[in-house]
Image (tube, helix red, strand yellow):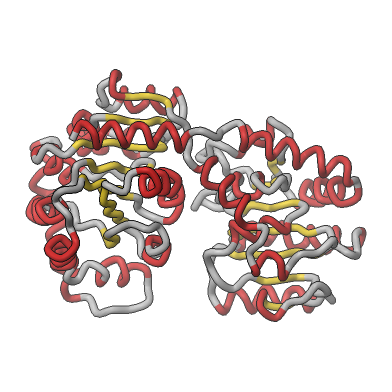
Amino acid sequence: MNSLLRIPYAAAWTAVRDIAARVPPGDSKLRRVLSGRTGLLERYEWWAATHRDKRKKLLWMHAPSVGEGLQATPVLQLVRARRPDVQIAYTYYSPSAENFSRGLGADFTDYLPFDITADAKRAISALAPTALVYSKLDIWPVITEVAAANGVKLGVVSATLAATSQRSGLIGRQLLGDAYRALDSVGAISAADAERFAEHGVLPDRITVTGDTRYDQVWERAKRSAELETVRSLRSDRPTLVAGSTWPSDERRLLPAWRIVKNLVPKARMIIAPHEISETHIRALLLWARAAGLSAERIDASSSDTDIIVVDRTGILGDLYANAHAAYVGGGFHNAGLHSVLEPAAFAAPVLFGPRNAASPDARPLADAGGGAEVTEKSAIVAHLLEWFQNPEARDAAGVRATAFVKGGLGAAERSFALVMDLLDRG
């Protein structure tokens, strides 16, 4: 890290840590981010004292949120299945990943410490990791620096660095340049990402193109999802649109379009899972549907006769796509970014998405492959859905192309596993 930034960086994180120590628990995301770190280092040290087997190597995998955690999942599953001699610690930054982390089979899961030298030293001393591997990009300069100083091997899997990333700016480069240079192995998702990591300081001979493990993750989930009770209970021959992770900006186009589709395809139904699960949002969707003369229920109260099924809980969207004849993926009319188009594509569902998709490495290539389409207005949504619902052959052909697109990306998990094993064996 640039020496001029080191003092203000440390002061800022120390202030955050001090605030966190005084913040009472609460339901807001910020409060959970802060209060979740109360007693954090003590939890690290307690686990190390009671469960750390120093005869075994330890893989520390960090993924900030659920999306990056999904990318880490196939690799962790391979480590757990093939290397019982390795312990696994898994950390995250966002409270949204807290419940998710419990299903990974890691030996230890908790929040990542604040990026402060003293805290990083305590965490690394407690865990005694052989390798610290980041999923996608969330590389922290101080933790990386302390880990390297303690002989911990450092890597990144499913590594991606967008050309427009703030990390590419002057301050980002000054903060992270040393951390990039310290990395022992980077598995980039594409040649373009590999080139950008090299430009940011990673030694070129330490970069390989391993691909994106999300392809393996969604494919494995698709194979398992068909027999889940949630999926079976919603199974129907009715033409079904699953609209996932929608924002109000999506719904302003999608809902009026759906009324037109419904008039022309009376048997059609929609399962909609909004991105923000709030009571206000759920009620608004139910009221809209009923005002439009459509039957509408929450998912647990729905039946095969329900026209609009509103999903009011998290964690099941990736499985619900198993019921889709077509999918709409939200975020493409919103600054937060497009949700995963791979999840529905793995179920052979052609995918619609909005125009703000430049940050998605999959959306436009999927459309180019014929497995979906970008839509910019209501009329385009109507046109594509009518084509797929009224012409089963066209829908099936688009679905086959969507599945083929996902199959083309498989294998990243094995290559990333090999990268991680190399780090552990060298450590």
* Nearest the eye: 46 or 323: 46
Image location (x, y in percent) of residue 163: 42, 31
Left/right placement of residue 51 relative to residue 407 reads left
Q: How many marks?
A: 0
Residue located 70% across and 58% down the image:
242
* Nearest the eye: 270 or 175: 270
Image location (x, y in percent) of residue 291: 79, 78
Residue at the outermost top position: 205
Residue located 63% across and 43% down the image:
355
The reply to whether residue 213 is visible in this rendering is: yes
Left/right placement of residue 26 relative to residue 282 reads left
Residue located 33% across and 57% down the image:
106
Question: Which of the 4 image quarters holds residue 65?
Answer: bottom left
Instruction: Establish if 130 lies above or below 303.
Output: above
Residue located 39% across and 35% down the image:
416
The reply to whether residue 364 is visible in this rendering is: no
Left/right placement of residue 60 relative to residue 152 reads right
Image location (x, y in percent) of residue 404: 68, 34
Image location (x, y in percent) of residue 122: 9, 56
Figure quadrant of the C terminus: top left
Question: Which of the 4 image quarters holds residue 323?
Answer: bottom right
Question: Which of the 4 image quarters holds residue 99?
Answer: bottom left
Figure quadrant of the N terminus: top left
Left/right placement of residue 80 relative to residue 179 reads right
Instruction: Establish if 143 lies above or below 107.
Output: above
* Nearest the eye: 32 or 382: 32
